[in-house]
Image (spheres, rainbow, N blue to C red):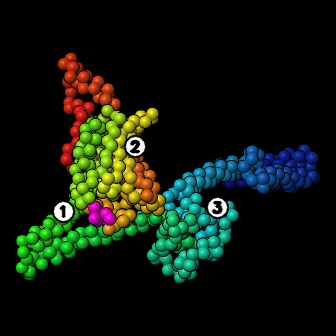
Amino acid sequence: MLGRFVLFLGCLLTAGLLGWWLDTHWPGGQAVPVSLVLAASIWFLVDSARAGIFLNWLRLGGSAEGGAVSGVWGDITTRVRRALRQRERQTLESQARLHDFLSALQVSPNGVMLLDGEARIEWCNQTSAAHFGLDLQRDLMQTIGNLVREPGFAAYLAKGDFGSSLTMPGRDSSPARPVTLSVQLHPYGDGRKLLLSRDITVLEQAEAMRRDFVANVSHEIRTPLTVLAGFVETLQTLRLDESERQQYLALMAQQADRMQTLVSDLLTLSKLEGSPPPGVESRVSVPVLMRQLETDAQALSQVMGEASETDHQFVFDCAFDGFLAGTASELLSAMGNLVSNAVRYTPPGGHITVSVRQRADACVVFSVVDTGPGIAAEHLGRLTERFYRVDRSRSRETGGTGLGLAIVKHVAQRHGANLSIESTVGKGSVFSLVFPPQRVVPAAAASDARTTRSNPSAPRGGPSSDAVATPGPL
């Protein structure tokens, strides 16, 4: 501004000197005042024109090229243009950060909803819209209380005490497929609220399963313990002859065996859930497995058929002379449970077919087909649940713990196999384990591997990964 003042004084001084020179050459004139007024007027007009150009440029938004190009107004134009460009960059950066923030909220597994002071929806992500059954475009700026009619939520919203969360059913909840939401409102800003929602269906189901598991274990153990306590009290208080004493001791041994079997199955499940999946280094001979299964099935059938003196009719068909990659004890446990279930639930004299075959897609299928009473369709989806029984009294009579198919399911998952169940009431059932090609080793491939390892010229290393494992006792 000092330079602008000096320039103005310089213009006036120049005009005054010009007027003095004119008065010197033409005496009697008024050239000096006229020159000063004329110079000031010209300065004012030029400065006003430059100010007008600057104001026009501002009215156009200041972003386009233009404005004053020299003088103070040109300097102001340059500085304003620089400030506007910096502000535009900051605005774009803020918009990009806001877009990234909203994008992150969109992919959040939890629902996020912003409500204004009147509880109207300002914004929500896809998860929140799915939880409450909202349309992101149609329902914006609608009152949340008009869209979510759950009585519990309406009471929670009206109460205004948002220190705790609310558990409520989701919009898509149904008796067949329940959906449970945990929602909580957090006040912020000027009367606004943040509504967070989380799908806790899996957690609720896990908690229900835990409660059922504890209750079932307590019940299953309490029953034989009660029987044992009763027999012990009888032996302590009554004088019994030898035959009665032996009978009571046999019943006590039966209940003790039942508890031992239950604890063994529980430990097996715990081991399966707590250990890493088996690798593909260990290989189990399928024919050896089938021979072991046949021996165990014949022995169990003889025990089950003592009363009727009729054994089951078995067919063991091993059409795959190869190996499965996995743990021998686990595979024998899973397959043995399927075979023993068929024996236990098929009446003496019934037919049981156990087969192993390789499909065209290189998968190996282990199947157990029986002619038992069959299972109704409504039970098929729950058979692998712990302690789930179609007929509890029948299961206890045959010595089942209700954990066999749960063990089969876990072993199948650990070996990448699928368990399929087909059954028709009155005709029988088919239980199948389908092993993927990654777990299948043909006999020829295993033989080639053994030949390579036995070659003296082959390079020596650590323990071979192709060792053939044979199943041991459970």
**Kind of residue indicated by mark 2:** Val
Q: What amino acid type is highlighted by mark number 3? A: Leu
Q: Which of 83 and 233 lies nearest the eye of the viewer?
A: 233
Work out which residue is located at the far top of the displayed protein and give it.
Answer: 457
Residue beneath disc 1? 257
> Mark 3 vs mark 2: which is more N-terminal?
3
Residue 172 relative to residue 357: left or right:
right
396 drawn magenta: yes
Mark 2 to mark 1: distance in Å?
32 Å
| Magenta stretch, main secondary structure class | helix
In the image, 320 versus 196, the foreground residue is 320
Q: Which residue is mark 2?
A: 434
Label 1: few (<14), some or many (≥20) within 10 Å? some
Name the front one of labels 2 and 1: 1
Q: Is residue 381 visible?
A: no
Residue 120: x %, y % from top left:
63, 71
Identify the residue shown where x is 34% and y is 61%: 386
Q: Which residue is mark 3?
A: 136
The magenta stretch is 394-398
Task: Report the mark closest to the observer, 3 or 2.
Answer: 2
